[in-house]
Amino acid sequence: MTTNGYWADPPYRRDRTPLFVPTLDSMVFENDPVRLLDEVLDGVDWSSWEAEYCCSGRGHPPIHPRFVAAAILYGLIRGIRSSRKLEENCSCRIDFIWLLEGRRLDHTTISKFRTRFHRQLKELFKQIGRIAMSMGLIRLCEVAFDGTRSKANNSRYNTRTAKTLEEKLQALDELYERLIAEANTFDAEHEGLGSPTKLPDDLADVERRRQQILAALEKAQAADEARRQQGIDPDKKPCQVPLADPDSRVMPNKEGGFAPNYTPVCTTDGHGGFIVDADVLSEVNETSALIPSLDRIAETFGQMPEKLLTDAGNNSGQVMAEAEARGVEFYAPVESNQPQPGNPACRADPTQPVPESEWDKLPRNSRGKLDKSCFVYDAEQDQYYCPQGQPMPKEKTKPDQRGGVRVILTVYRCLACACCPLAAACLSDKNERGRTITRDEHEQPRERTAARMGTESAKKLYNQRPRIAETTFGILKSVMGMRQFLLRGLEKVKTEWCWATTAFNLMKLVRWTAKLRAEGAALAAPSGS
C-alpha cells in the first residue's frame, strides 16, 4: 500500500493564496492556434464596426467589437454556435478567457451582435481573403462553385398550403372580431381598457399570428402561380410554405424526405481551399448565383478566376456564355449535340447520306426517334444536314423559357421528308411538315465547352472538383455544425452563413500561417542542429 507522500501535490491549493500568481498569458501554450487567430484579428481594420457604436459617455464603456466577433468566430471554429454555450465558455474555458482578456459576454449581447453587423462582416470576409491572397494562398487559377442543403429553423411538419392558410386566416379573423367585441364591451363597462395605444395581450397575439399567416399566404400564392407557369397544376400539387420561416422552401433533404431548407453556395479556390465567395438562396437550383459570384470575386480580389469548375446542374448555355464573356474557362459535364466519333452521322461530307447498313446504329431519343446528334450543323451556311444529307435551312426564330430564363431559339426544318426512307424513324406520327431541329443562342459556347471537356487535361482538372468544393461543405457541416441554421429569415440566414464562411477562412489562414512559420523556422535553423 502506497503512502500519502507518493502522489504529486497540486500546484495550487484551493484554500491558499499563492505568492506568485500565474499570468493569464502563461496558461495558454505558445503554439496554441488561438494566439495566431488573435494576431490575425488584431491586424484587421475595425473602424467600420466601431462607427456603429454611439459614444454618449453614459454607462459602462462598450466592449470593443473585435472581441465579440472573435468569440463568435473562434466558437464556430470549435463547433460552438449557441449564444448560451458561448456565454458559458467565455467564463470557463481558458482559451476563450485568454482571447477576450477576461471580458464576460452574455448570450443576449452575442445574439444581437451576430445579426447587427452584416455589412461589416462581409468586409471582414473580404479582408481575410485579401490577406490570404497577399500570402500566395489564394491564386484564382481554378475555383469550384457548388451548393448544398441546410435545414431551416422550421419543423418539417409546420408547413401549409395556400388553401389551408386561407382557412386559418378566416378563423383568426373571426377570433379577432370576437375579441374586439369583448374588449369594447369590457371598456364600456369599466371606463377604459388599459392604454389606448397598446392592444391587450390576447389581441396582440392574434394580430401577430394574422400577420404571420398573411406573409405565408402571399408566398404560397406566388409559388403556386410559378408552378402554374411551369405547367404544374397547383390544385393537384400545391406548394407547401413553412410557417415559422416563410423565407425558406420545402426541398428534398440530403438525408431523404422533404423539409424546409435553404441552399447555401460557396466558390472555393483550388490552391489553398479558401472560400472566395459565399451566399444563401431560398430556391432549389443554385445556377442563378454562379455568375454573380464571379463578379463579386473580381470586385473583392481585383481579378477574375481563370477557370471555373462546377457540376452538371449548372451547365446551362447562358452560364457558359456569360463565363466566356468574362474570360473564364468553364468546366462542367456537357454533351455535344453534334455527332461524335462512333456515331454514323459523324462523316466527312454531311451532304452525303449515312449508309443504310449504319442506320440501326444512329442514336435515338427518349421517344425512339432519331436524336438531335444525328444532324450536322454547318456554321458557314447556318443550316443543318439530316442523316440523308438533305439541307435543313433556317425557318424562324422564337422565344422560349428554360429554367425561368428567356432564350431565343432558331428553328431549322427539312423540306425533303415526304419521300425519305428514314421518315418512320425520324418523324412523329403527327408531323406533317418535316423534321425540325432547334438551336438556342448559346449553342456555340456549349459546343466549345464540350470540346474542352473531351481533352485529357480537362478531365484531370475536373477530377479535382470534389476535393475543392465538397470538402468545404464537409467541414462547415461536420465541424462547425452548419447542417441547420439557428436564425430565421433569408437576410439573417445570409449573415449566419457569412459568419461560418469567415470562420472557415480564418481557420485556414491560422493553419497556413502556422505551417509557413514552421517551415521558415526549419530553414533558418543551423544545419545539424
Image (tube, rainbow, N blue to C red):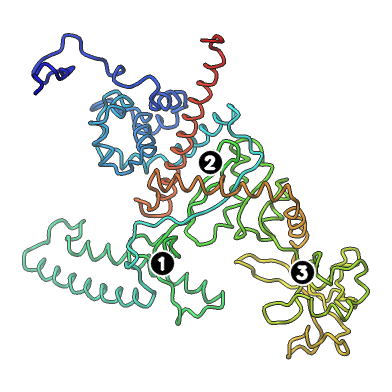
Residue at label 1? 258
**Nearest the eye: 419 or 54:** 419
Of residues 218 and 80, the one drawn nearer to the viewer in this rendering: 80
Image coordinates of residue 212 in percent, x first then y, are 32, 64
Which of labels 3 and 2 is toward the front? 2
- Whole-percent x, y for residue 198 in the image: 20, 57
Q: Residue under label 2, please give it.
A: 275
Which residue occupies 40% across, 71% down? 240
Residue in the image at 25% along x and 27% along y: 58
Mark 3 vs mark 1, CA separation in Å? 36 Å
The one nearer the camera, 99 or 325, is: 99
Crowding around mark 3 (Cα neighbors within 10 Å: few <14, some 14 to 19, many 20+) is: some
Say whether residue 392 is left or right of residue 30.
right
> Which element is circle 1 on?
strand
As shown in the figure, which amino acid type bears the numbered disc 3? Arg
Crowdedness near tag 1: few (<14), some (14–19) or many (≥20) residues, C-alpha within 10 Å: some
Mark carried by residue 439: 3
Q: Residue 520: give x, y in percent of width and height.
A: 55, 18
Which of discs 3 and 1 lies nearer the camera? The answer is 1
